[in-house]
Amino acid sequence: MLTARDLGRVLPSAWQQRVKMGARQPYRRFLATVRRGEDDQKFWRYQDVPAILALWSDGLPAGRAHLVVVPPAGAPRDELWLRTAAVLGLDVTGLDTDARTPNDSLGLVEAELLRRINERVPRPRRTPALTRHVKGRFVPEALAGSAERESFVLPERHHDWVRDRSEATVADLRASAYDVVGDLHDLLPADPRTGRTPDDATDDELLAAARVVLSRLDLADTPTLDGAVAAIADELLTHR
């Protein structure tokens, strides 16, 4: 069973998750790298839905490979869970589905601040323990909510190639024998919308968020962005 959602939402989310894991690459450069198929194909290794299904369904009877389409934005929160449970044959009556460890989604200022903090962490000191601390404690307890929650978009200049790729994916899947739960049309990106990206975050916005983080970490305030980022990075390195 594989879940998939439209690339217009996958790309911003994938960049953010990489930043939580320690990535330093700016958002605009990440998008350009994915478009060109660089980065040793790492992104497409996990996001090429037809290729993944073909690999893991090899030898299975027809209909035993299931594709669960992630509902579009605005759908009921439990719709993906209900679709997954239907494939598994689970009775969801009475089940508690409240998240115990939510995966905090960051706004564009918070995400860019974390990327800049990552730049101050020497690569040899980026340990698995540090990554666990960042994702499990630092992001939810210190970073999330340090700035106004402003989601970021896929820039309009990337929409055409993302839609072309998505249409090819949907065509491949329609011609397959996989069991599809949901509407394949939901794998097509929504129309482009205006908005900012993490690359647009200003130094003033980043400094304001960094000072909130410093306060939450009981660290001394600092009037400069470089000083604040350095202080936060130094504190994180005590958890390596």
Image (cartoon, helix red, strand yellow):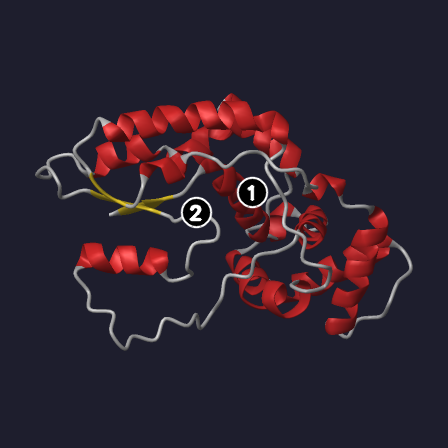
Q: Which mark is residue 72?
A: 2
Disc number lying in front (1 or 2)? 2
Q: Position of residue 107 (x, y in %)?
A: 65, 54
Horizontal relation, residue 62 to residue 32: left or right: left
Instruction: Assign a secondary structure to mark 2.
Output: loop
Q: Which mark is residue 12?
A: 1
Q: Residue furthest left?
A: 61
Q: Position of residue 109 (x, y in %)?
A: 72, 51
Instruction: Assign a secondary structure to mark 1.
Output: helix
Res 90 visible: yes
Q: Position of residue 229 (x, y in %)?
A: 78, 55
Amino acid type at mark 2: Pro
Which of these two is toward me, 203 or 164?
164
Residue at 16 percent across and 61 percent down: it is: 89
Residue at 19 percent across and 58 percent down: it is: 88
Horizontal relation, residue 60 to residue 101: left or right: left
